């Protein structure tokens, strides 16, 4: 009876961390995986592997980072803001490598999806990649499947 009269308040959500290059990359990888509204275990695993290799993290640390990135992706700024962080903090050659990593996430489930490809194009453009580099990343990714 008291619960109906005096419902418990939900605890305030934890504030999200300020995006840095690590979180921005993770959030963009998650954004690519979510683009087709079908976030699969293979995509989660690929994101964890990329985060682990890129930042030298142990598997559990990479999974925790990905979980933070998932929350950040849901409630954080748009692609241009994340890309701006990466443009400021990451060299061009490394941003090209990020493009390859995002293609790996998009194609790890074995399906080409137009929504994922559109999201990838928007991210690559926001990262300041040249048309030639974007085309090369796409061709390399499609050869691998």
Image: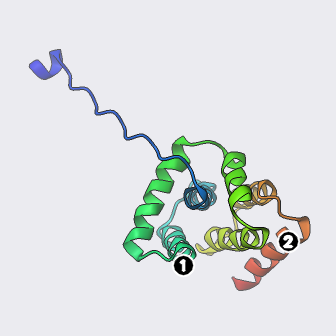
Q: Quadrant of the N terminus?
A: top left
On screen, residue 64 versus residue 130, left or right, reads left
Residue 115 location (% of width, % of height): 70, 56
Say which label, 2 or 1, has the lower sequence index.
Answer: 1
Give the vertical position of 74 relative to 62 (above or below).
above
Q: Quadrant of residue 124?
A: bottom right
The residue carrying pointer 1 sits among few (fewer than 14), some (14 to 19) or many (20 or more) residues within 10 Å by Cα, namely few
Seen at 61% across and 55% down, the residue is 31
Please name the residue that numbered disc 1 is placed on.
53
- Which dot marks residue 133? 2
Marks 2 and 1 in Cβ contact (< 8 Å) = no
Give the vertical position of 136 relative to 5 (above or below).
below
The residue carrying pointer 2 sits among few (fewer than 14), some (14 to 19) or many (20 or more) residues within 10 Å by Cα, namely some
Q: Which of the two marks, 2 or 1, is nearer to us in this view?
A: 1
In front here: 102 or 89?
89
Residue lying furthest top in this view? 5
Seen at 88% across and 65% down, the residue is 130
Q: Secondary structure at mark 1?
A: helix
């Amino acid at each position: 009876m008291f619960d109906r009269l005096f419902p418990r308040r939900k605890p305030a959500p934890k504030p999200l961390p300020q995006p840095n290059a690590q979180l921005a990359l993770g959030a963009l990888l998650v954004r690519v995986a979510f683009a087709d509204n079908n976030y699969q275990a293979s995509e989660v695993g690929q994101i964890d592997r990329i985060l682990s290799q890129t930042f030298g993290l142990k598997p559990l640390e990479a999974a925790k980072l990905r979980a933070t990135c998932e929350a950040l992706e849901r409630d954080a700024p748009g692609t241009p803001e994340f890309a701006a962080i990466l443009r400021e903090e990451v060299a061009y050659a490394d941003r090209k490598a990020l493009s390859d990593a995002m293609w790996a996430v998009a194609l790890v489930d074995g399906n080409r999806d137009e929504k994922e490809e559109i999201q990838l194009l928007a991210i690559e453009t926001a990262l300041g990649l040249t048309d030639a580099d974007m085309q090369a990343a796409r061709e390399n990714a499609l050869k691998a499947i």
